[in-house]
Amino acid sequence: MLIRGIGRIESIEELKQSVITAHQGTPVLLSDVADVKIGAALKRGDASLDGKKAVVVMVNKQPMADTSTVTKAVEAAMEEIKPSLPPDVKVTVTFRQSDFIDASIHNVRDSLRDGIIIVSIILFLFLMNWRTAAITLSAIPLSLLICLMLMNLFGQGINTMTLGGLAVAIGSVVDDSIVDMENCYRGLRKNQLAGNPKPPFQVVYDTSVEVRVSVLFSTVIIAVVFAPIFSLTGVEGRIFAPMGVAYLVSIFASTFVALTLSPALCAILLANQQLPEEETWKAIADFESFQEKLMHLIVVSDDLQVFLHLHPDYKGNGRFEVEANLPKAGAYTIFSDYKPMEQPERVYLVKTTVTGAKLVATAEDTNLTKMFGNTQVNLTFDQPTIKAGEEVIVGFNLQDTVNNQPVTDLQPYLGERGHLVILKQSSNLTAADYIHAHALKDYAAGEVKFVTHFPEPGTYKLWGQFDRNGEIVTADFWVNVQ
Ligand SMILES: [Cu+2]
């Protein structure tokens, strides 16, 4: 005989009939000692919130899913469910993982911003020049942007670690740009001081090529130093690799910027600027006098109508002072011509604007014979047409208007027979437009000759200055050079 015991209960009746014990030989059933009936199902997600009954709904994302995206989708789904819920059921969010991610991204973004501000302040302090600072600063947004574009292309999202990598890179991305800009700046300054300057664009190109290899190698070295981070395995590897990628990609992007945008900006912002001559803002202490003065200051209105030739007083420690009376409102260019001790003569220019009532501009008087007080001056040249780049002898014949005889009362002026300033007419006067001339020693009565050369074709203005017994005659003429 086979006895089979089936231990599975299929109905509440069977449960009632279950024997739980035997008492003096009599079986005791469950229904004898208890009420057996179907009760409430086991509650899942049962909880309390603020002392009230609540149901907790927890959503877990899949391992590869993006937390922020999942959070937004869950919230949207909850909004859809809301209308179908009983009126006394309220939906409250208690834990939102996305908040933590948002907060940390926010923190890193703040550090990123602070980093940019600090680097900017330091650049301004060290360079003391908005142009150079702008050139180097432009590398920050551009490098980070290129980096983000590349990361996006390879499916690397923005998270705390990649943003952290960018924050670390901020200080370094200006590096390459500074190297390039600094070399361009140095080259342009040297070029401007050279007696025979090259075209500024050529200088920008040459100086940029000079540092090209160094800039590239420095980036490769940084990459090599950073490489071990990618050999990390496990959790550390997963955490630090995106940071390393973000850092290295932005460093390479900055090299690209330094080799392209920085020289281009140097060409635009620096090439045609008058750059300071000294490496630092250290004052030149010793000057040599030439033509009897330590400094010759030529002040002209940009239309070349107003001309002043001044000799500022030296106050020591590189400081000169002079008072000038400018008769006309408008843009002015001031050329200071000086000679630091045992160094070649230099011309440094400053631009300024004078406000006030404008005088009516006089037409360009191209006559070669003009009256200046009681002196009639006639301008002559040793050749019929003046050609650019050729040596020219410019002669001033001075006649007294009273007796129509050559003047006989000429005194030496600034150590020579006379003084001649020549400027090329230009919409933007530069030091190159200031042309030197020297008085010749041999002369006839009332005649002063200067030797000079005009570098380029164009219109020039000449101011000859002569001392007639203490009275300075300034004779200005317009000249066309072919
Ligand atoms: Cu002078």
Image (cartoon, rainbow, N blue to C red):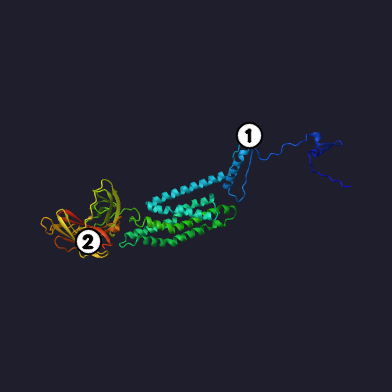
Q: Tell me the SS state at disc 2.
A: strand
Could you tell me which residue is drawn at 45 percent across and 57 percent down? 257
Could you tell me which residue is drawn at 44 percent across and 50 percent down? 119
Q: CA distance from mark 1 to mark 2?
A: 102 Å
Picture quadrant where residue 99 is located: top right
- Find residue 425 and report its horizontal and vertical position in percent: 27, 57
Could you tell me which residue is drawn at 22 percent across and 61 percent down? 438
Q: Say which label, 1 or 2, has the lower sequence index.
A: 1
Q: Tell me the SS state at disc 1.
A: strand
Q: Is residue 123 visible?
A: yes
Q: Quadrant of the C terminus?
A: bottom left
Picture quadrant where residue 78 is located: top right
Q: Residue 132 — which label?
A: none
Is residue 123 or residue 38 the one in the foreground?
Answer: 38
Residue linked to disc 2: 438
Residue linked to disc 1: 52
- Amino acid at circle 2: His
